[in-house]
Image: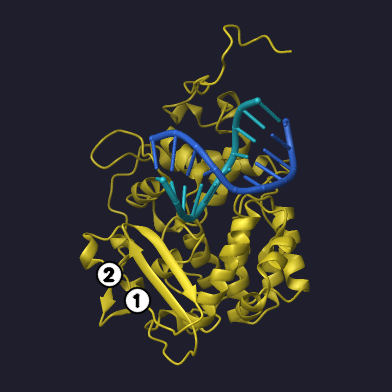
Chain colours: A yellow, B cyan, C blue
Amino acid sequence: MSNPKTRSSFKLLQSQCETPASEPNPGSESSNGGSVSELRVFVRKKRGRKIIETQETKYEAEPLDQKQRGPPEIEEFGYKQVNGSFQSSNASFANVPTGEPPPNWEKVLEGIRKMRSAEDAPVDTMGCEKAGNSLPPKERRFAVLVSSLLSSQTKDNVTHGAIQRLLQNDLLAADTIDKADEATIKGLIYPVGFYTRKAANMKKIAKICLVKYDGDIPSSLEELLLLPGIGPKMAHLVMNVGWNNVQGICVDTHVHRICNRLGWVSKPRTKQKTSTPEETRQALQLWLPKEEWVPINPLLVGFGQTVCTPLRPNCGMCSVSDFCPSAFREISRSPSKSKSSSPSKKL
DNA sequence: ATCCAGACTC
DNA sequence: GAGTCGGGAT
């Protein structure tokens, strides 16, 4: 059956724009850009939370002060401080999986691929990057960032419409968004999910990109994570699509849920399920070969929307249920709210 | 009325 | 860890 309500943001991943690896990385330079006049950007990490403020005063950037706060929570990204400035972390990231792969994982993956292809999944082949394709690299990357921001919790066509309206109004670049009215942006991106916050985040992101990255986007994972509204999932997506640089697996709730059902991930040194997508990502990266890091997402997203659904997984139609420890075992969620003694009576 | 799904707050 | 945001689909 067709699946018209694909809300994956990962169509972005499918058609990889040709991004020369030799592209300049303005964002990876030190954060002391300097010569921008009147603007002030504080980027600071406090107990793992983002604190980002922008004001119309003087430019000044503060790198993360991890020393003062104990061990950083993103140490695995290879974050480093050198003379108070950021350093690109690509080289320091250990990307060789060393953990023990779960049994039959290759069969399971192949089985899921078959299910997905048989189902003519429409998950991809269009997307916001189309709008960006005609743009020069810097603008294209910015469009990718905005598209990612908008696409979360939003269906493809809605996201696409919003991007088109932004494009028509010349509001898909850092400088123009920075000047634009927040209410205008809000109106243009409606009805994407959480449009109010996203409009505000777009303004902040535009300002930060303008001041700190000369209108480009951050080129490292940890700097992307500092942008408001950009969390682990989107940061990895943007690294993949925007920079063609795979730093980690893009784990959303589908990947999180399915990997746990399959018994592919667990908390360190235990057999307990992971409790967050971040935890899942780290556990998965311990053993999954890197060639699979990008394709695993669109694969499991589609699978998770059609077969291995959150509420009632269709184990009966799943060809890999024999390998799945959770097959036919997931019971309906706790009927927490049903009040009346007889839940079947509805009027 | 419930579910969806990512980032963030408390 | 639970609640919040904001629509749309069911």
The secondary structure type at the circle numbered 2 is loop
Helix, strand or loop under label 1: loop
* Residue A5 x, y percent position in the rendering: 70, 44
Quickly name the residue at label 1.
Answer: A62
Q: Quadrant of residue A198?
A: bottom right
- Between A106 and A155, the one lying in front of the other is A155
Q: Residue at x 62, y 81 (%)?
A: A175
Q: Residues within 10 Å of mark 2 (few under 14, many from 20)?
A: some
Chain of the residue that carries numbered disc 2 in the rendered image = A
Task: Judge whether A242 appears above or below A253 on screen.
Answer: below
Image quarter (top left, top right, bottom left or bottom right) of the C terminus of chain A = top right
Give how far across and how far down residue A22 sits, in percent: 48, 83
Q: Is residue A4 left or right of residue A215?
A: right
Residue at 70%, 48% in the rendered image = A122
What quarter of the picture does the N terminus of chain A occupy?
top right
Q: On the picture, is A114 further left or further right than A86?
A: right
Label 1 sits on what residue type? Glu
Please name the amino acid that badge 2 sits on. Asp
Q: Nearer the viewer, residue A199 or A30?
A: A199
Residue at 54% over, 21% down: A337
Cα–Cα gap, marks 1 and 2: 8 Å
Query: Foreground: C5 or A130?
Result: C5
Say which residue appears at 44% left-offset and 76% top-offset.
Answer: A41
Tags 1 and 2 on a common chain: yes
Residue at the disc numbered 2 = A65
Q: Is mark 1 in CB contact (under 8 Å) with mark 2?
A: yes
Q: Is residue A229 above or below residue A81?
A: above
